[in-house]
Amino acid sequence: MGDIQIVLAEDQPLTLIGLRSAVAADSGIQVLAECQDRGRLVEAVKRHSPHVLFVSTDMLQEKLDALQHLVSVINETRVIVLTSQKDPGFLEGALRCGVKGVFQRDWPSHQIPVAIRKVTSGGVWVEHAVAERVLENLHNSREGHNPEARKIASLTPREREIIEWICKGAKSKMMAEQLRISEVTVSHHLTSIYRKLEVEDKTALVIYSVKQNLVTF
């Protein structure tokens, strides 16, 4: 049995086969499960409690809010995302969501076990060129903006939607119905928003949002 246990999640069968083959080359890594169904992804991770989840962003429809929710509900499992995304904003957003590794599809597959071992040991796996793009994007976002720009830039699209509803006076139940998510998920988003913007409650959030022109009336 391998000392590192992982779950692979990818909705393309051929890619999943390639991932399985790449990991099989390392006898110290054991694949506990493979998942091709987004709806069963969280269930699979909770059932097997792997050290690492290696998941394609395609399964999450390239949505950062879906990634953030996934990371928030799978507890101690470290997440590495497989992506074809080159946009520095997306890559930075993924890291801000709490993923421990970004593995791009055009990288050599023999690096996959290296990435898995890196994050298992407490590190973060980001290829040098990607790190440079993320840092450059962060630097550019700081220049010529107010001091709150970095906080605002960290918000996911879903979190911005939540802010808009809050500023309209919507309650959690109404937001859940309109966005087709659970009230628990709404609560998770609010907690993340409060943390990122450093506000304490809905009233402070509304005041902040108006002051920073996040919403218009």
Image (spheres, rainbow, N blue to C red):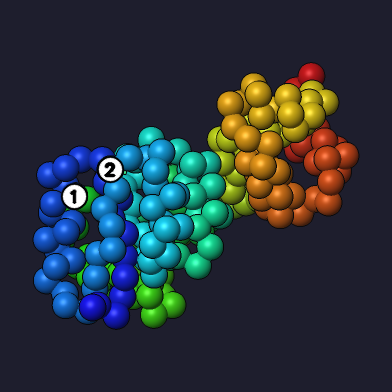
Verify CB contact (< 8 Å) between mark 1 and mark 2. Answer: yes
What residue would you read off at disc 2?
A: 36
Report whether 201 appears left or right of 45.
right
Instruction: Judge by depth and name the residue closer to the eye, 126 or 1.
Output: 1
Instruction: State which quarter of the image contains the N terminus.
Output: bottom left
Identity of the residue drawn at 62% across and 51% down: 150
Is residue 156 visible to the viewer in this orientation of the structure?
yes
Instruction: Estimate the x, y position of residue 67 in percent, counting from the top left.
Output: 47, 47
Q: Which label sits in the foreground, 1 or 2? A: 2
Identity of the residue drawn at 71% across and 54% down: 195
Q: Is residue 103 above or below residue 181?
A: below
Quarter of the figure with residue 113: bottom left
What residue would you read off at disc 1?
A: 16
> The disc labelled 1 sits on which kind of residue?
Leu
> The disc labelled 2 sits on which kind of residue?
Gln
Q: Callout 2 environment at 10 Å: few (<14), some (14 to 19), or many (20+)?
A: some
